Image: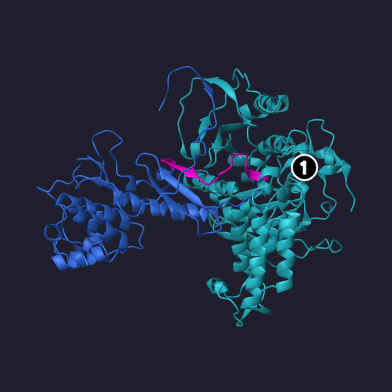
Amino acid sequence: MALAAQFLLRIPQLGRKNINFPSYKHRGNYQPLFLSCNYSTNDNCSSTSSSKKKNYLELTDDELLRECEMDTYKSSGPGGQHRNKRESAVRLKHVPTGVIAQAAEDRSQHKNRASALSRLRTLLALKVRSSVNLDAYSPPPQLLQILPPKSTIRSSEVGPQIGPNNPKFALGMQALLDLIFAVEGSVSEAAKLLGLSTGALSRLILSDDSLRMAVNEFRTSKGMKPLK
Amino acid sequence: MRVSLTRACRFYTSPITPKPSFFSPRAILNQPFSSSSSSSSHSSTPKPKTPLFLKPPKYSATLSDLKKWHNWAKALASSVRSTFADSDNGPDSSILFRELNWLVEDSLEDPSLIPQLGFQNNSQSVRLRIGLDELYGLWKQRIEKRKPFQYLVGCEHWRDLVLSVEEGVFIPRPETELMVDLVSDVLVRDNDGLRDGFWVDLGTGSGAIAIGIARVLGSKGSIIAVDLNPLAAAVAAFNAQRYGLQDIIEIRQGSWFGKLKDVEGKLSGVVSNPPYIPSDDISGLQAEVGKHEPRLALDGGVDGLDYLLHLCNGTASMLKPGGFFAFEVPISSFLVEVEFTFSFKPHKYHVVEIPFICTSSGSFLKTNGEKQCKFLKNYLENDSACSFCNVSIVSDFAGIQRFVTGFRQ
């Protein structure tokens, strides 16, 4: 990544300044950000288009963190040895999408940062949509992983079913929501494409609160009844 | 305790007259203190205090008495409002409320009872790790004397650790948490067997950095944690033992490189968060820091850079080729304006990698005055250009330049 030949490199205070975010409510009506990614879910999200259209959930923790602004300090100042004010709450704003996640329950900033990042992944899965090619639909591996073993398209190579506590669940949830959006909220249609009965897919959706809420909000917006 | 000024002259390669205030009266013991040493029999090894959350719950109080205390403590915290913040950038009431919750958490044998504090006139008895009257005393000290919260509860949560701290020992800062990640990243790309070598944490205090690094080293790696203050050495040893790391971390009481002759030229890594506050700035800091934390751990001399200078001068000979160093630095001491024709590679944590070359045109940005520029100039011209490579300035999550790292050529 070489820059132009000669330049005066002044190393400024890198990173961002403190920004006061108003309290953020992410429950309720959200507008899903629809990235018209148009990549087939067959390949590993290595999009051939510009680097902006990527799957944020496939970034490592460090890469994802790099795309965020972290707001912990309400006051400015040098910090470090100069300061003993424990504001361990962490608020992460994912700059490319504007999604915000926070954590405050731990006494260590480090742990709150980890919690906030994990919450951010979930929120990104819930909010960031990619389009899906229904004509030649093949569920990506991360989606197969969250399906129950009885799914007829799920081979044994996929490994055991992973649940909501697994860090990879967010990736699968994202792919599932992409599909549900593509079929306009029809669980039965989605179930067919996943080799499951409608009931089995329904149960999967209901097994996680945020997944259930996301699906139901979308269904409601399409005039359909929420899943129970 | 004897204050040894002759030792002071050995520290510095530049003629800086050490001020008596550098040395905390309790700090100077010329005896080696090492967990493997049996020679120093007459030095009194300080006994580290047990943190509150580890104390046995041998006290009790009724819920209503506890509630009474809690209400009193909340009112006291509430009365502060923003007076501390306005006077010396200290905590405001909301921060104090949070600290009060943590104090209760550490005091109760069963913290799940906390919601029940809301019920009036409850004569049910609860077990406590501290007497109720002592709780009154502690919180009074917090508010009236600005005693740091961490000294009240005897611990600090740092990364995924809980470290014992007490008066006389520096409280590890959240910014320093990143130091462990910097080392961890180096070890991931490690081609020189750094992860199985000797590391050194200079000025270890509670042992925070040493313990953090010990857990990411390879199975044959080890770390020597050095501190001048025998109390810190004792507390660091206690913390290391709590995490089962006493075989990986060796504690040496002494000054900087003074007790490290045996590993000179052999080190895989040198890390430090040395005192870096200018002496005259200390009285202006928030009272929790300036009036309660050990001056020895804060005072970096007139411009705050005395120890950093010493470290930069000494590290090259301590590291083996390819060895790594990382120092935490004070804000704005490393702002540098240079001309380069090299590629600029944005890195994680907002790192800028600067391949140092001998002929940097060096028009230095003056920040806190000429001392810091002189420091940088000395560093570049005498030492680093031939000794170090891949020197980087790493910012913390707030975007403040926090660390300088690099490798021995």
| B380 vs B64: above or below | above
Where does the image place residue B358, in percent across and percent down from the top left? 60, 22
Where does the image place residue B327, in percent across and percent down from the top left? 63, 41
Spot the blue chain and give its letter.
A
Chain B shade: cyan
For residue B274, say whether it is visible.
no
Identify residue type, mark 1. Answer: Ser
Front one among B119 and B157: B119
| Residue for point 16% across, 58% down | A224
Q: Is residue A114 magenta?
A: no
Q: Residue furthest right?
A: B2
How many residues crowd mark 1 within 10 Å: few (<14), some (14–19), many (20+)?
A: few
Q: Quadrant of the C terminus of chain B?
A: top right
In the rendered structure, the answer to whether residue A66 lies left or right of residue B137 reads: left
Q: Residue furthest left?
A: A135
| A165 vs B299: above or below | below
Where does the image place residue B271, in percent across and percent down from the top left? 63, 45
In the rendered structure, the answer to whether residue B401 lies left or right of residue A220 reads: right
Which contiguous range is marked in magenta?
Answer: A66-81
Front one among B230 and A89: A89
| B377 vs B31: above or below | above
